[in-house]
Amino acid sequence: MSVPFLDLKAAYSELKADLDRASQRVLQSGSFILGSEVEAFEEEFAEYCEVEHCVGVANGLDALHLILRALNIGAGDEVIVPSNTYIATWLAGSYAGATPVPVEPDQETYNLSPAKLQAAITSRTRAVIPVHLYGQPAEMDSLNEMAGASGLTVIEDAAQAQGARYKGKRAGGLADLAAFSFYPSKNLGALGDGGAITTNSADLAEKIRRLRNYGSERKYYNEVKGFNSRLDELQAALLRVKLPKLDEWNQRRQNVAQQYLDSLSEVPLLRLPAVPPDVTPIWHVFAIRHPKRDALQAHLSKEGIGTLIHYPLPPHLQAAYADLGFGPGSFPIAERLADEMLSLPIGPHFSEHDINDVVSAIKSFAS
Ligand SMILES: *Cc1c(COP(=O)(O)O)cnc(C)c1O
């Protein structure tokens, strides 16, 4: 590949000296679980997200799951999720014993449509989990207002949105609670698995702190049946090196995105991402839409351009969710997006040369 979809080695190279120093510090400390690094990262990430509390956990899926557990959401309950998300959003509901109830996205932003939310709310609905898909915040004011009117909790799936803003406020502080993933390819990525919950509720933060550590506050005394889902000291130390770079790296992605938007605006049949005026996306993914997506992807691959599809099969058509009984046609917008979306390479270490290669390869398909 002349332009790979993702280059994580470049990220390591830029911060090598500091990352190496941080990992040495942890290896020599003799403290690996729930120590000073996790505590410091939680404080720093809460401050970054402009919220009161952060709890580090093992990954993004656990972050969502532990939130639902802390809210006592379980068997018999329904949780509203986007029809076009990564399956983790649905699985969190299933892990808790609740039923995921899909709602279709807005056709322009690909985020959960407030216009379609009301019809999905039943007497069993307990929570709504909007996803800030591709790093662009969902329409939170409308969603919060409608959910609030029905007594529902709103949980941000901010796994793709570290640093994104909505009406000036950071993702992570846009609802009752938020779940983050630090999977290596995310904009703020660990060098392994990691995740976090942010919230302004001291009570929920404390419940989640207990749940992530066997339901225990005092060693060997367990108040509830908890889980083992801890962010480890090594990952926390590495994340503390990367967090101060996040805004700059997100800005570099923004520059790449802007060049794509400027250079590809005239390409026939190709649909570029739409950014509403009140959001600042962080371009975790730069996803275009094309009716001949598979042919375009094959052409780009031939030209040495790596692409991915987010996501090729919506959760309701996955074998894993056959039990819910949704057939093809149940969520036509999600199904259409699955057929037409294509993610172009983007990242903080992307060069002018890379951008030009991608743009000219796309133009040579169109012409
Ligand atoms: C990555 C991701 C998750 C899950 O994160 P993990 O850390 O891999 O468990 C959840 N939701 C969305 C939308 C994601 O992109």
Image (cartoon, helix red, strand yellow):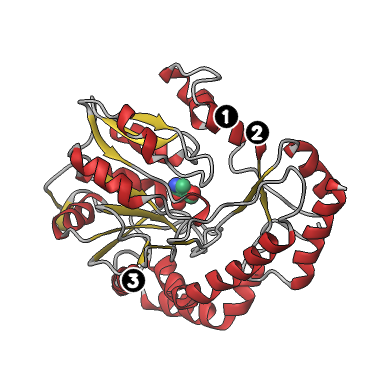
Res 88 quadrant in image: top left
Q: Name the residue under label 3.
A: 31
Q: Residue at x 71, y 46 (%)?
A: 270
Three-letter amino acid code at the position of disc 3: Ser
Q: Which of marks 1 and 3 is nearer the N terminus?
A: 3
Ligand 1 closer than 8 Å to label 1 CB? no
Gap in angstroms between the C-alphas marked 2 and 3: 48 Å
| 271 with respect to 42 (left or right) | right
Q: Name the foreground residue: 155 vs 209.
A: 155
Q: Which residue is drawn at 78% across and 59% down?
A: 359
Three-letter amino acid code at the position of disc 2: Asp
Three-letter amino acid code at the position of disc 1: Glu
Q: Residues within 10 Å of mark 1 (few under 14, many from 20)?
A: many
Q: Which residue is drawn at 41% across and 20% down?
A: 324
Q: Earlier in the sequence, mark 2 or mark 3?
A: 3
Q: In this view, does 191 lie above or below 344?
A: below
Q: Name the foreground residue: 285 vs 233.
A: 285
Of marks 1 and 3, the one in the foreground: 1
Q: Name the residue under label 2.
A: 339
- At numbered mark 3, what does the secondary structure look like: helix, strand or loop? loop
Gap in angstroms between the C-alphas marked 1 and 3: 47 Å
**Are the residues at dot 1 and dot 2 in contact (C-beta closer than 8 Å)?**
yes
